Image (cartoon, grey):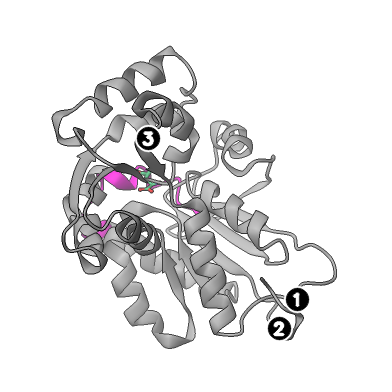
Amino acid sequence: MTSISDITDKRPIGVFDSGIGGLTVAGSIARRLPYERIVYYGDTAHLPYGEKSAKALRSYADSIAGFLQEQSCKAIVIACNSASAVAADGLRKSLGKSLPVVDVISPTARMAARKYPQGSIGVIATKATVNSRIYARRIARWAPDAKVRMLATPLLVAMIEEGFFNNNISKAVIADYLSRSNLRNIDALILGCTHFPLVKSEISGFLGDGIQVIDSTDVVADALTEVLRERKLLADAGGRLPTHRFFVSDLTPSFVQSTEIFFGKKLKLERKDLWA
Ligand code: DGL
């Protein structure tokens, strides 16, 4: 709980993703920390991040972190698994102790590891995230006996971006992916991509009650709250609600339309190409 004694810092929180998927995380932050101002950056010109090399993703992340620093952000949330997988450590090193960096993978992996220390944990994610093997490494830190089963599900990102969910097409794609042999006999499934909360209920419906489906939205918002409280960076819990800003590197009508589904309400997107 936020107490009046730790309130101080009105600077915004920087949140970024390859596009609008990270709005699922930003939405959770806005709901859990309503007095925090968010500056969001969606690198829509470069998506899908899941298909990019680690080198390219690091370079995009550096540019975006530079922009968020210019916006006077007090913390950065990497609301993208693919970027978290390859760029989080580098950003932490370069930004130093002054600017905390919260990624989506560590808090989610820790939560799953603590809950299923001897279990079999499935992860569905982009190719970039699967190839990095980051979930297996992170989970092994807290649960060396847990088994981690990874599956790249790149079609899910494109499918969700195109608005195909809660229909027969999404049902068929989900059923095909989740029936693959390496997800057999899992105890829990991590949604290792910030787009996937949009199909969480379909996935849970397919897997049934016995398998917990874990997404990173609230876990990451809680990890951010912890960091802000520890460093005394929380915003004033009184006064007016903040106005967030949402930047994208490339602006198209379909991104504008999709924001409502991802964030929970309609947003005004501003075009800001950091590479122009
Ligand atoms: N939202 C990104 C993630 O969490 C994936 C989308 C993309 O491939 O750009 O990995």
Residue named by callout 2 = 8
Q: Amino acid at mark 2?
A: Thr
Residue 79, which numbered label? none
Residue highlighted by disc 1: 236
Residue type pointed to by label 3: Val
Give the mark nearest the N terminus, 1 or 2: 2
How far, Cα to Cα, is label 3 from label 2? 38 Å
Q: Badge 1: few (under 14), some or many (20 or more) residues near its Cα, within 10 Å?
A: some
Residue 45 covered by magenta stretch: yes
Quarter of the image for residue 48 reads top left
- The reply to whether the residue tagged 1 has its Cβ within 8 angstroms of ligand 1 is no
Label pair 1/2, CB-CB below 8 angstroms: yes
Mark before the other along the chain sequence, 1 or 3: 3
Residue 231 drawn above or below residue 63: below
In three-dimensional space, the C-alpha distance between marks 1 and 3, rounded to whole angstroms, equals 36 Å
Please state which of the two labelled residues, at mark 3 or mark 2, is closer to the viewer.
Answer: 2
Mark 3 within 8 Å of ligand 1, using the beta carbon: yes
Task: Name the N-terminal-most of marks 3 and 2.
Answer: 2
Q: Percent position (x, y) of residue 39?
A: 60, 62
